[in-house]
């Protein structure tokens, strides 16, 4: 290593952010000390990105950092919580300073933009892996779990589905695409935008929520299983990016939208009587959300086209162990 572990931490991770409120003791001691507001509950999540599994080995270091933090922010958003602090466990094959510089830049760009503060971590040597633990706050009892969807609730998603899966297809393929479109899809794969504002806005409104990371149908499947309900999805309502139409036929695009991973959008359920108020709120903030179906009694996930024809799903989302 050209720099030792302590120099590396000091150079790339210490003192990179303004003082955060609630931070009693940050990087540099045996552990961090944080103030938890007395009227809030702590919400904690961890996500790891491994080279070659969660991102191609040659992904730009700034993008790896952005994604590692963004996927954790997405989990906190999916609980309706406000993100506050995080720790970083970094496993590096070597201390490449050019790589570290880019990683640190990407990391603090997202951290500062999301108002979260790095408070500690661990640095080891081995195959490239980035693990982040993120801490957030929510009012007592207000966290939005996956488990309380009710029959009759509307099912909504934010943004567009399948963009990251398209990005993954583009990398290393000979698909010709306009440079601007190519950058958009690869950007959606490498640098997802966590839906932090929407997540918090849904507190007191959504009955259940999950972030879409393994593929829309797979994640709806998890939500309905937790809630002991079924769902009826109109696949023709599932929003896809306008650009995508010109590169894929409808079937392929639908499959990417329904089963492709890494969207990091929010999927939530809401009682019909709360729908209008929500639509007004998101409309004012220009946050795109789309109704794609309903929660049903029972346990089936039914996917149909607008004309009533059954959609035969191919593939069912990402699973590390199958
Ligand atoms: P210890 O041996 O007591 O676990 P370390 O030597 O691993 O401490 O880390 C020293 C300090 O640097 C700790 O405060 C730790 O939280 C912090 N730290 C280590 N690695 C990172 C990292 N990648 N990002 C941020 N802080 C880190
Ligand atoms: Mg340590």
Image (cartoon, grey):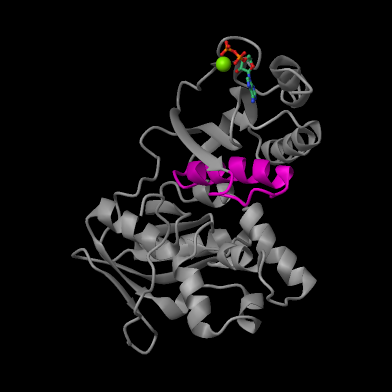
**Horizontal side, residue 231 vs residue 22: left or right:** left
Q: Residue at x 69, y 58 (%)?
A: 187
Q: Where, by quadrant of the figure, is residue 124 drawn?
A: top right
Q: From the viewer's perspective, is 117 left or right of 139? A: right
* Total numbered labels placed on residues in the image: 0
Instruction: Report the magenta residues as a range.
Output: 51-80
The residue at the point 73 percent across, 28 percent down is 95
Question: Quadrant holding ligand 1?
Answer: top right
Q: Please state, as top left, top right, bottom left or bottom right, where the C terminus lies in the image.
A: bottom left
- Quadrant where the image shows the N terminus: top right
Q: Is residue 13 left or right of residue 316?
A: right
Q: Residue furthest left?
A: 298
Asked if residue 105 is positioned above or below residue 200 in the image, the reply reads above
Residue 156 visible in the current orientation? yes
Q: Position of residue 47 (x, y in %)?
A: 50, 39
**Nearer to the camera, 296 or 187:** 187
Q: Residue 148's x, y, as percent?
A: 29, 51
Q: Is residue 78 magenta?
A: yes
| Residue 263 drawn at (x, y percent) | 54, 59
Q: Is residue 260 highlighted in magenta?
A: no
- As rendered, which of 108 and 1 lies closer to the eye? 1
């Amino acid at each position: 290593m050209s720099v030792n572990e302590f120099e590396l931490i000091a150079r790339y991770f210490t003192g990179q952010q303004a003082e955060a409120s609630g931070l009693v003791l940050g990087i540099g001691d045996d552990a961090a000390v944080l103030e938890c507001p007395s009227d809030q509950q702590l919400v904690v999540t961890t996500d790891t990105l491994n080279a070659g599994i969660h991102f191609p080995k040659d992904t730009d270091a700034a993008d790896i950092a952005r994604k590692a933090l963004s996927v954790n922010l997405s989990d906190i958003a999916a609980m309706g919580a406000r993100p506050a602090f995080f720790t970083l466990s970094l496993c590096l094959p070597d201390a490449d300073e050019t790589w570290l510089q880019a990683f640190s830049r990407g990391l603090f760009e997202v951290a500062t933009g999301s108002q979260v503060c790095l408070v500690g971590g661990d640095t080891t040597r081995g195959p490239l892996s980035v693990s982040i633990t993120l801490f957030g706050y929510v009012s007592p009892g207000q966290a939005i779990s996956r488990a309380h969807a009710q029959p009759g609730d509307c099912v909504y998603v934010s943004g567009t589905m399948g963009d990251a899966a398209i990005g993954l297809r583009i990398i290393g393929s000979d698909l010709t695409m306009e440079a601007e479109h190519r950058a958009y899809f690869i950007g959606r794969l490498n640098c997802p935008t966590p839906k932090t504002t929407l997540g918090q806005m849904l507190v007191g409104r959504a009955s259940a929520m999950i972030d879409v990371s393994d593929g829309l149908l797979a994640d709806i499947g998890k939500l309905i299983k937790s809630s002991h309900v079924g769902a009826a999805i109109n696949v023709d309502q599932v929003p896809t990016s306008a650009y995508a139409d010109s590169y894929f036929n409808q079937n392929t695009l639908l499959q990417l939208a329904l089963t492709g991973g890494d969207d990091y959008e929010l999927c939530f359920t809401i009682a019909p009587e709360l729908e209008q108020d929500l639509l007004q709120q998101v409309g004012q903030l220009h946050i795109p959300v789309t109704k794609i179906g309903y929660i049903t009694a029972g346990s089936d996930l039914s996917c149909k086209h607008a004309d009533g024809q059954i959609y035969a799903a191919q593939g069912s989302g990402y699973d590390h162990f199958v």
